[in-house]
Image: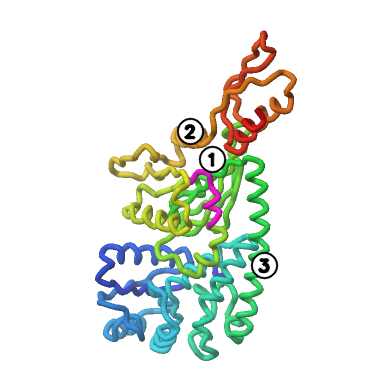
Amino acid sequence: MNEKFTKERVILVGCELPQMNERHDELMKELAALTETANGEVIHTFTQKRNRIDSAYYIGKGKLQEILAFVESSEDIHVIIFNDELSAGQLRNLTDFFDLKIIDRTQLILDIFASRARSKEGQLQVELAQLKYMLPRLIGKGTALSRLGGGIGTRGPGETQLETDRRHIRRRIKSIEEQLTKIVEHRSRYKERRKRNDVFQVTLVGYTNAGKSTLFNRLTVGESFEEDKLFATLDPLTRKMDLFKPLTVLLTDTVGFIQDLPTELIAAFRSTLEEVTEADLILHVIDASHENYFEHERTVHHLLHELKADNIPRVNVYNKKDLLESIFYTTDDSILISTFNEHDITKLIKLIQDKIQSELIHYTLRVPVHDGRLLSLLQSRTIMADKTWLEQEQEFLIRGLAPKNIADSIFKHE
C-alpha cells in the first residue's frame, strides 16, 4: 500500500521535570502535531512526572511496564516516539525492551525535514544533520538501527547506508560539508552583488505554522507552499515586492522555528538561517490565535538573539485575527492582521513602506541641467519625491530618499 495513504499507529511518551511547568503540555501537543505531519496517528500519550530523566530508559520501570501492557493489548502499534533526544544507550535499551521501532523528537523533526527539502542545498543540509545525529548511535546490525524498516524516522540516508561503517559515514559527512561550503560561497557572492545593486531585503521569520508562507504569497506573486502543518516550507524562497520604484525590495520566506530545535539542524541550517542577519527589515509572523503564542514569540526572539539579529529593525505581525475570540492589543511596532483580509494586507504594506522609508536618507540637491550622470543616478537609484526646474539658475531642485550607500556617493559627488 502507498505510504502516502498509510498512517502509522504511534504512542507518544514524555517526561515532565519539575522546572517545565506548563511547557511540558505544550511540547507534548507539539509532538502530536509533528507526528501527524510525519503521517502518523497518535493512539495514546503517556507522561510521567520525575525529578530527572532515567539514564538507562528515559522513564521509570513502572511506566515502562504500563506502556508495554498497553502495546500488548492494542492492535498494530508501529512506533513509540519520545519527547526528548535519546542517548545511544537509551535507544538500545528501549528497543530491546519493547521490540518496536523507537524514535525521539530529534529524529522525528529530522524525518519531517527530509520529506520537505526540495532544493539541493536543503537536501544536503538535512542529510548532514541526520548523519551527525546517527553517527554516535550507530551500534551495528541486529540492534536498534537494523529494525528501522520503513515509515516515520527513516527518510533520508536510508537503512543500508546507516548500517555501513563509521568511516564511510564520516567520508560522506566531509563530502557534504565541502559541497555546502561551495554553495555558501556562491550565496556570499550573490549577497555582495545584491548590496551593490541597492536591494532592500525584507525577511519573514516566525514559529512554524504561523502563516508565513500564506503571507508571503499575499505580498508577492510567489508560489510558496501553503499547508496547515508544521514545517510546510523548508527551503528559503525569495520574490520581488512591488513597493518603491525604482528601488528593488525582496521578500524572503524562511523555515519555521520550533521549541527545542535539534542542535544538529541548527548547525546544518546555520548558513540558511544566517540569511536573516542580512535582512534590512524582519517581519516576525506570530499566530495570535494560538494559546501559547507568547512562548512561540519568545522562542523566535531567542533564536534571533543566537543569530545576532537583535539589532535589525523588526515588525511583529500578529496573524490569524479571524480566529481570535477576544480583544488582542498591539504596540506601535506591531500589527494585527488576517492574511485573507485585503484591507489588512494593504495596511501591512503601508507599514513596511514606512519602515523602509525610515531607513532611507533624505536629500535635497541642486543639479545643473548639464549633469546628466547625476540626474540619471537619482532617477534610477533613488525615490524622487519632488523635482522643480529653476529657470534663472538653469538647474533642478530635487528632493528625495536614497539608500545609504547611494546617498554617500551623491554627497561625495557634490
Q: Residue at x 55, y 50 (%)?
A: 278
Question: 10 Å neighbourhood of mark 2: few (<14), some, or many (≥20)?
Answer: few
Q: Secondary structure at mark 3?
A: helix
- State the separation of the CA atoms marked 2 and 3: 40 Å
Q: Does the magenta portion include 275?
A: yes
Q: Residue at x 30, y 63 (%)?
A: 23
Classify 196 as above or below 116: above
Please give the residue where the numbered disc 3 appears in the rendered image. 179
Q: Secondary structure at mark 2?
A: helix
Q: Which residues are magenta?
A: 274-282
Q: Does the magenta portion include 295?
A: no
Q: Are marks 2 and 3 in contact (CB under 8 Å)?
A: no
- Between residue 414 and residue 55, name the one nearer to us: 414
Residue farthest to the bottom?
142
Number of dots carrying numbers: 3
- State the separation of the CA atoms marked 1 and 3: 33 Å
Q: Which mark is residue 219?
A: 1
Question: 10 Å neighbourhood of mark 3: few (<14), some, or many (≥20)?
Answer: some
Q: Which mark is residue 91?
A: none
- State the separation of the CA atoms marked 1 and 2: 16 Å
- Between residue 189 and residue 328, name the one nearer to us: 189
- Between residue 289 and residue 402, name the one nearer to us: 402
Res 166 → quadrant: bottom right
Measuring from the top left, give residue 273's x and y in whole percent.
53, 57
Please give the residue where the numbered disc 2 appears in the rendered image. 354
Measuring from the top left, give residue 379's x and y in whole percent.
67, 27
408 with respect to 214 (left or right): right
Res 199 → quadrant: top right
Q: Residue at x 39, y 57 (%)?
A: 299
Q: Earlier in the sequence, mark 1 or mark 3?
A: 3
Q: Earlier in the sequence, mark 1 or mark 2?
A: 1
